[in-house]
Image: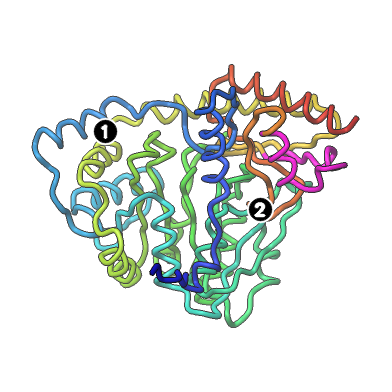
């Protein structure tokens, strides 16, 4: 007799990642022979640089295939601190660094270690899909701060301040933003830091796309005087070095927080893959030539995508200042069977074979996210299909 499965109630507080769901559906259709143009995945189409791959090969040859410290090798933690210092002028030590299984893992560990049930977490909208779910899983309360499309989806210190309460534990800032590509100015980021630090509120800076800015030079709020006391950096090698499948991320934070996160990690994943850690050391310490090459190509694609989207009657688009996403407003097509962004994305995939992520996943209902981390050929094909689909939906 089979026992009835009783799923833990905390699992009901989270949903399946919308981006992963879109990727899975697009992959299923491709396996069935459908010609899908995939704008869903937030994944560079560039190969991992050869020097990084060679470091992994060398690690295998040297039989570096055993367990490491749960929070990463001392060598990699030191290399991460050195790279962050070189790029941004910070001064972290290895004891203030944790290596994780991707940037998402760093964010999950932090929120589970920091947020108690009832604690409030400030999240600007639109937001990366995972923030909401990991806060809910911890029993925290998401406090969403709506931003304006007309203002480029940029959040301000004044907007955040209106939502602070005695229960506020953490403010999350993702700049450049996934999904909108919005980038906070240094002045506004400093104002937010001053606001949170004076109230002993932690500030999480998600720097996953920190090297991909089109107008400004990269910077980190963690370099501000006194920032190490309340700022936590979540970083990733996935986008900067085209290493999504290698699953290496990191956190930089006060040693006490790193210790708590490491305790959790020691009972969940334990160490990130040993071979990937050796590759990550090379990424941190080796040539950085691939980064500006990718940035230049993303800029070229961004400009093409924005110009093409603006040729679609009724579609509005804020020019992204960073990352590699466009976040157009497609509500002009909401009629008949299409009532929201989820309907739009489903119909677009079913009838035009173009995969996008609905804005609903990011907290808005009028938008879709288009990843332009793909070839110009695919961008041309997909945007042509999108244009025809919207024209058909409006007629």
Circle count: 2
Near-viewer residue (252 or 278):
278
Neighbour tally class for label 1: few under 14, some 14-19, many 20 plus, Cα within 10 Å: few
Q: Mark 2 points at which residue?
A: 126
Q: Quadrant of the C terminus?
A: top right
Relative to 210, is 52 on the left or the right? Answer: left
Query: Which residue shows up at 65% across the image and 63% down it?
Result: 157
Q: Distance between the residues labelled 2 and 1?
A: 35 Å
Instruction: Relative to 324, say whether 220 is above or below.
Output: below
**Residue 333 highlighted magenta (yes or no):** yes
* Circle nearer the N terminus (2, 1): 2
What kind of element bears circle 1?
loop
The answer to whether 231 is drawn above or below residue 117 in the figure is above
Start-end of magenta stretch: 327-349
Q: Measuring from the top left, give residue 54's x and y in whole percent.
A: 22, 28
Quadrant of the frame with the N terminus: bottom left
Image location (x, y in percent) of residue 86: 34, 44
* Foreground disc of the pair 2, 1: 2
- What label sits on residue 286 in the rendered view? 1
Please tell me which residue is depicted at 74% across the width and 44% down the height of the picture. 343
Could you say which is closer to the camera, residue 331 or residue 204?
331
Residue 147, position in %: x, y?
72, 55
């Amino acid at each position: 007799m089979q026992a009835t499965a009783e799923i833990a109630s905390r699992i009901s507080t989270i949903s399946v990642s919308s981006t992963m769901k879109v990727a899975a559906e697009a992959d299923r259709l491709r396996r069935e022979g459908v010609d899908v143009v995939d704008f869903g995945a937030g994944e560079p189409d560039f190969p991992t640089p050869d020097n990084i791959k060679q470091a992994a090969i060398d690690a295998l040859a040297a039989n570096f295939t055993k367990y490491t410290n749960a929070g990463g090798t001392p060598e990699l933690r030191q290399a991460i601190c050195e790279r962050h210092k070189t790029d941004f002028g910070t001064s972290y030590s290895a004891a203030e660094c944790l290596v994780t299984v991707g940037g998402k893992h760093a964010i999950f560990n932090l929120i589970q270690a920091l947020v108690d049930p009832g604690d409030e977490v400030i999240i600007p909208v639109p937001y990366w899909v995972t923030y909401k779910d990991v806060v809910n899983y911890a029993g925290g309360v998401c406090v969403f701060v709506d931003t304006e499309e007309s203002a480029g989806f940029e959040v301000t210190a004044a907007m955040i301040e209106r939502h602070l309460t005695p229960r506020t534990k953490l403010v999350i800032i993702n700049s450049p933003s996934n999904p909108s590509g919005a980038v906070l100015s240094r002045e506004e980021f400093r104002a937010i830091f001053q606001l949170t630090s004076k109230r002993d509120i932690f500030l999480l800076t998600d720097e996953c796309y920190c090297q991909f800015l089109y107008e400004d030079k990269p910077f980190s709020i963690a370099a501000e005087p006194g920032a190490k006391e309340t700022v936590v950096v979540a970083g990733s090698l996935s986008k900067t070095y085209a290493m999504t499948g290698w699953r290496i991320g990191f956190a930089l934070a006060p040693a006490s927080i790193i210790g708590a996160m490491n305790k959790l990690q020691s009972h969940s994943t334990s160490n990130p893959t040993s071979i990937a850690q050796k590759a990550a050391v090379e990424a941190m310490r080796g040539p950085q030539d691939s980064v500006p090459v990718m940035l230049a190509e993303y800029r070229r694609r961004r400009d093409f995508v924005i110009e093409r989207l603006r040729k679609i009657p009724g579609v509005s688009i804020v020019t992204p200042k960073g990352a590699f996403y466009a976040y157009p407003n497609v509500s002009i097509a909401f009629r008949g069977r299409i009532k929201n962004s989820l309907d739009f994305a489903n119909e677009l995939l079913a009838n035009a074979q173009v995969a996008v992520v609905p804005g609903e996943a990011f907290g808005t209902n009028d938008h879709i996210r288009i990843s332009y981390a793909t070839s110009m050929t695919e961008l041309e094909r997909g945007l042509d299909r999108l244009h025809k689909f919207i024209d058909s939906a409006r007629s």
